[in-house]
Image (cartoon, rainbow, N blue to C red):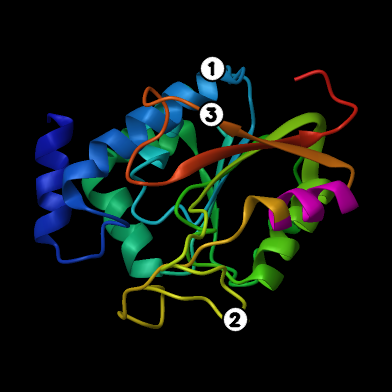
Amino acid sequence: MAFRDRVEQLKASGVFLGGPPKLFETAGRKTLITLVALGLTPESRVLDVGCGSLRIGYWLIHFLLPQHYFGIEPNVPMLEAGKQFLLDPEVLAYKAPRFDHNTEFDFRVFDTKFDFVVARSIWTHASKPQIEKMLDEFVATATQRGIFLTSYKPPHLLRRDYQGNVWVGRDHISTQGGAVRHSFRWIREQCAQRNLAVEEIKGSAYNFGGQRWLKIRFKNSRN
């Protein structure tokens, strides 16, 4: 079955797709392209934070070796719908992706060292304490040359830097939409405190949907 037909079935099921339907395929393709440009290989171990209905996971699961894709998603019906409509049972059985449903951004549940951690459209809803937790978890679970690829929206005059302590937007509990912004300066400071370096990834070949990719790595790595 064609991928777009699978997406139409997923959409018809009524689950939240994780973003605008018109960008569902773009999100997966461009994320994979960005990761490959950063050095992703089939041998890489990848953690997909907030993997949702597998709009990115679909591409990664097919690209990576068996048992090399890991996803965290608290919204169980959303994830199960993605598995049902996007992945054939044979693919699931062979690729054997691993999932967890924790709500604490706990990367250590898999007892694995990751070459890449991906968080698309997560920091655009997360509070600063939640972002700090994700950075701490990356430090604890990434390989020495590991990369954290995450997206964000910078603040401006009408959309200020978010100072709240709770998640904003749809999740496993709420259907209320919303998004937040965080300053690059604050993100850079938090990274520096953890011996991490951060840079924006430029270019329309990689960025989409009004968000900017950030590449985070250990300062002493050679990536």
Can you identify the residue that label 3 sits on? 66
Return the disc, 2 or 3, that comes first in the chain's sequence.
Answer: 3
Q: Residues within 10 Å of mark 2 (few under 14, many from 20)?
A: few
89 relative position to 14: left or right? right
Residue 141 painted magenta: no
Look at the image and give the residue range highlighted in magenta.
Answer: 186-193
Kindly report the distance in space between the C-alpha atoms of the residues bearing marks 3 and 1: 21 Å
36 relative position to 221: left or right? left
Q: Of residues 55 and 42, which is closer to you in this image?
A: 55
Q: Main secondary structure of the magenta part?
A: helix
Q: Image quadrant of residue 214?
A: top right
Kindly report the distance in space between the C-alpha atoms of the residues bearing marks 1 and 2: 34 Å
Q: Residue at x 27, y 58 (%)?
A: 81
- Image spot of residue 54 (x, y percent): 37, 47
- Image spot of residue 37 (x, y percent): 53, 17
Can you identify the residue that label 2 sits on? 164
Numbered tag placed on residue 6 in the rendering:
none
Q: Amino acid at mark 1?
A: Ala
Q: Secondary structure at mark 3?
A: loop
Please say whether residue 65 is visible from this viewpoint: no
Can you identify the residue that label 1 sits on? 37
Please say whether residue 107 is visible from this viewpoint: yes
Q: Which quadrant is the N terminus positioned in?
A: top left
Q: Amino acid at mark 3?
A: Pro
Kindly report the distance in space between the C-alpha atoms of the residues bearing marks 2 and 3: 39 Å
